[in-house]
Image (cartoon, rainbow, N blue to C red):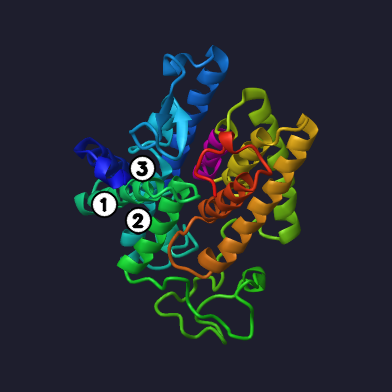
């Protein structure tokens, strides 16, 4: 198993990456990873593998032969055991959940404070160590998933498991609080009505009076038809970038860089990294002409977008901490792509994680 190949260096890298994610904030750390991935893929594209030296494939987790592989700086750094989302981003999310336990409703951040992943959490040693612990956990989880050969994206899986572990560890409800039982858990109308805890029908505020009853992940982009349209648009874009660059990770990196606009307070910016990666993989894995490849990218883009929206309604909108809808979507789409590759529908050789 891959766990037997762990080194002290990898664990220390995970500790440092998680601490950095806590200090910078989860979303800034993820943006930083996106910059590294984008630069790494552009260097490969422009110089025919110059950054990797001889073009060898480098293991995402620090040891060659892993299930999820990327070339050069993308694999070693952007998706690696220090800056990778399963380490730095997950560390920032875990630390935010810890800090948010004692913070109540704040008008500068209208949701539960444990969801504030754009906020740098400072240099408190305890907070940094919490982030570091989740960073190490991310390395271990991703290594375990990769080692057993599970047909799923190990980085995304580690991010999701880590986020759920943070909820359990710090005493938050695993899924979310029970709302008005007359409404479906998928119903977002309380957000549109600006319903808040402490009002009639929502008296069990549990110290959160004034906080919204339903907290949409992306308030400007949660209607199903709008989400599907974003899936088509960014699926096509990502598929095109993949075809011209022959990279499954370039569009993913660009999508992560776009998160920087959210960090700057432009909250209407759509998030699409969960669309970019599967769309890129599908475009490269379809062996027919480019038009069919782009159609396939658009289709998987819609699926990824809708799964992300379903996830936010189930695990984010009613919860107290950040469980990332895009990474849940990446877990689901990686399973779907793995099944398609295992069935021979698409070319399994370009799928960057195990297949069925």
**Height in image: 269 above or below 62?**
below
**Height in image: 231 above or below 315?**
above
Is residue 59 rendered to the left or right of residue 331? left
Total numbered badges shown on the rendered structure: 3
Is residue 181 rendered to the left or right of residue 6? right
**Label 3 secondary element:** helix
Residue 218 % position (x, y): 60, 56
Q: Which residue matches tag 1?
A: 133
Point out the tag, 1 or 3, that comes first from the N-terminus: 3
**Nearer mark to the viewer, of 1 and 3:** 1
Residue 134 % position (x, y): 31, 52
Q: Which residues are magenta?
A: 252-264
Q: Is residue 68 magenta?
A: no
Residue 61 % position (x, y): 36, 37
Point out the tag, 1 or 2, that comes first from the N-terminus: 2
Residues marked 1 and 3 touching at CB (< 8 Å): no
* Relative depth, front residue between 278 and 355: 355
Marks 1/2: CA–CA distance = 9 Å
Which label was assigned to residue 24?
Answer: 3
Q: Which residue matches tag 2?
A: 94
């Amino acid at each position: 198993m891959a766990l037997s190949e762990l080194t002290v260096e990898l664990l220390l890298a995970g500790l440092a990456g998680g601490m950095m994610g806590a200090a910078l904030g989860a979303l800034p750390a993820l943006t930083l990873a996106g910059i590294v991935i984008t630069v790494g893929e552009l260097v490969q594209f422009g110089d025919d593998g110059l950054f990797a030296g001889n073009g060898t494939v480098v293991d995402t987790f620090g040891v060659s032969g892993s299930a999820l592989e990327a070339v050069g700086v993308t694999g070693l750094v952007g998706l690696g055991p220090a800056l990778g989302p399963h380490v730095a981003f997950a560390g920032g999310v875990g630390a935010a959940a810890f800090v948010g336990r004692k913070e109540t409703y704040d008008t500068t951040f209208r949701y539960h404070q444990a969801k504030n992943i754009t906020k740098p959490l400072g240099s408190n040693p305890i907070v940094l160590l919490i982030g570091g612990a989740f960073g190490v956990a991310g390395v271990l989880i991703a290594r375990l998933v990769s080692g057993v050969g599970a047909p799923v994206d190990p980085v995304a899986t580690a991010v999701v498991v880590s986020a759920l572990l943070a909820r359990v560890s710090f005493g938050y409800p695993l899924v979310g609080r029970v709302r008005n039982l007359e409404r479906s858990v998928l119903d977002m109308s309380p957000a549109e009505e600006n319903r808040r805890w402490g009002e009639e029908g929502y008296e069990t505020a549990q110290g959160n009076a004034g906080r919204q009853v339903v907290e949409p992940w992306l308030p400007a982009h949660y209607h199903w038809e709008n989400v599907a349209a974003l899936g088509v648009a960014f699926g096509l874009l990502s598929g095109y970038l993949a075809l011209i660059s022959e990279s499954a990770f370039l569009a993913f990196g660009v999508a992560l860089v776009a998160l920087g606009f959210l960090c700057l307070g432009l909250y209407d910016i759509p998030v699409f990294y969960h669309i970019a990666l599967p769309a890129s993989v599908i475009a490269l894995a379809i062996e027919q002409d480019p038009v069919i490849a782009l159609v396939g990218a658009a289709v998987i883009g819609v699926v990824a977008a809708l799964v992300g929206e379903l996830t936010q309604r189930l695990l984010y909108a009613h919860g107290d901490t950040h469980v990332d809808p895009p990474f849940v979507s990446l877990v689901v789409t990686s399973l779907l792509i793995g099944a398609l590759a295992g069935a021979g529908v698409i070319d399994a050789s370009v799928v960057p994680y195990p297949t069925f």
